[in-house]
Image (tube, rainbow, N blue to C red):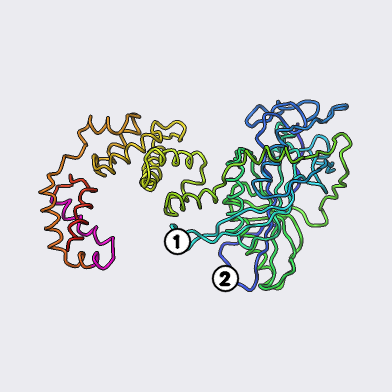
Amino acid sequence: MKLCAPSVPSVTTTLATSSPKSAYEAVIGLEVHVQIKTQSKMFTRVAAGYGHEPNTLTDPVVLALPGALPVMNKAALDAIIKAGLLLGCEIAPVCKWDRKNYFYPDSPKNYQISQYDQPICVGGAVEIELPGAARNVMGEHKKIPLTRIHLEEDVGKLNHGATDSLVDYNRAGTPLMEIVSDPAMHSAEEAYAYLSSIRATMIYGGISDCDMEKGQLRCDANISIRPVGATHLGTKVELKNLNSISFVRDGIDHEIKRQIAVVERGGTLVQETRDYDGQTGTSQSLRSKEMAHDYRYFPDPDLMPVKVDAAWKARLQAECPELPFAKQRRFVERYQLPYSLTSVLVWDRALADYFEEAATLAGPGKAQAVGNWIVNDLLRELAAAHLTLATSRVRPAHIAALVQLVDAGTVLTNAAKEIFVEMAATGDQPDVIADRKGLKAAPTDTNELETWCRDSIAASAKAVAEFKSGKDSAINALKGPVMKAAKGKANPKLVDETLRRLLAAL
């Protein structure tokens, strides 16, 4: 379908530099739309999908032909209830459907089936982590409260050209959640963390793939400023077309600076909707408050209310996975992993599961070594070979076996690095590669090793004194000379044990 291009106001704002710290704080609320991953659309059996020929995923219900009636998709209801449970929402015992009336070419019905005064999920919160003091230090955590999550059908997509627009209704009717936060964020970084957390939660729960390039995750931001210490809300500006998580952060940061600049030069902020261009870092006014829609909501006469009983909720609660932050806390406590490792592992559910399988196979006390091999070596090799975890030749059992070889001193660390590269290329077991390439460590004569250790102790009085005073890491200064004398082929575990035995006797 071809339409004339809509006219757009041309008022554009560009902020090239950051404003200095001012006496104002930002107040931010986000409206996040998440497409639910279902085989069919919200109110019809026609397939839901992306990348098909335009206007091929349609039927009489999608196109609102006379006599076509909607039928609810239970899989979509399951998904939003599960999302609500993951985010700690109260699941309404009864919810109903409403018609949101407006005329726009992307809506063939001239209304959208949505939920107005009785949404399915109420309250809840999204846990976020604020930036830490350093990359390897856990930041402060806080919870951003939610107002509601409701279910609706998506609209079509307008593709604008220079002189006209084309309408593709393939997306129309796709199940869509709207997650509405309270106005409880105060910086672009908080909003970025919030959106990242929602994305991870939805992917973990199998609710959506949240690919912003495919329109599966979309975000509008409501932003205002007020004097620091004030409790009232300022004039709200809605920011649209934030089509990547980074653009959400950049767009909000831009809008905060724009509003502060307007107020500080004596201007007045107006309630409006603005379009943000992430490529140029500019925004322009789309419409003012006076142009806002009156949607004239009323109950949909073709759809019955939905009753959610305890059994339905219990079934979905049993399917809810452990979320990233909970998993991170457990990894730190159970496996004694440093934050730097957990912050990589937990945000990919498949990677976290891979780690746990390898750590279990490797045995007690070896989880950190397993995590290091995965984060530092496996991910590097996958990126170099353009592979995913699912297509990798290195399975958790490979990692576990390599860790055990190094821990036993059968293979030294430098040799293990070479083995890993070969393992990633061939999928062979590490002990097979070690035998084939002659990389197993030579047995060390214990008398000779003890002599080297005694020599190192005798030559390193400072390190010995530090170790004896309680500084355990001081023993590393004694290991270097021993490994040098052994030409790098001594068993590190045996070196450590021998040094500790001799030091204990002093």
* Residue that label 2 marks: 20
Horizontal and vertical percent position of residue 120: 76, 44
Tell me, yes or no, whether the highlighted magenta stretch contains residue 186. Answer: no
Is residue 484 found inside the magenta-colored segment of the image?
A: yes
Which mark is on residue 47? none
Taking depth in this image into account, of 102 and 95 the one nearest to the observer is: 95
| Depth check, front residue: 476 or 276 | 476
Image coordinates for residue 357, horizontal then vertical, percent: 44, 38
Label 2 SS: loop
Start-end of magenta stretch: 466-485
Q: Is residue 361 above or below residue 480?
A: above
Badge 1 crowding class, 10 Å Cα cut-off, few under 14, some 14 to 19, many 20 or more, is few
Identified by mark 1, the residue type is Ala
Where, quadrant-wise, is the N terminus in this rendering?
top right
Q: Nearer the viewer, residue 421 or 336?
A: 336
Q: Is residue 187 left or right of residue 92?
A: left
Q: Are marks 2 and 1 in contact (CB under 8 Å)?
A: no
Q: Nearest to the eye among marks 2 and 1: give it.
A: 1
Residue under pointer 1: 134
**Could you tell me which residue is drawn at 83 percent across and 50 percent down?**
293
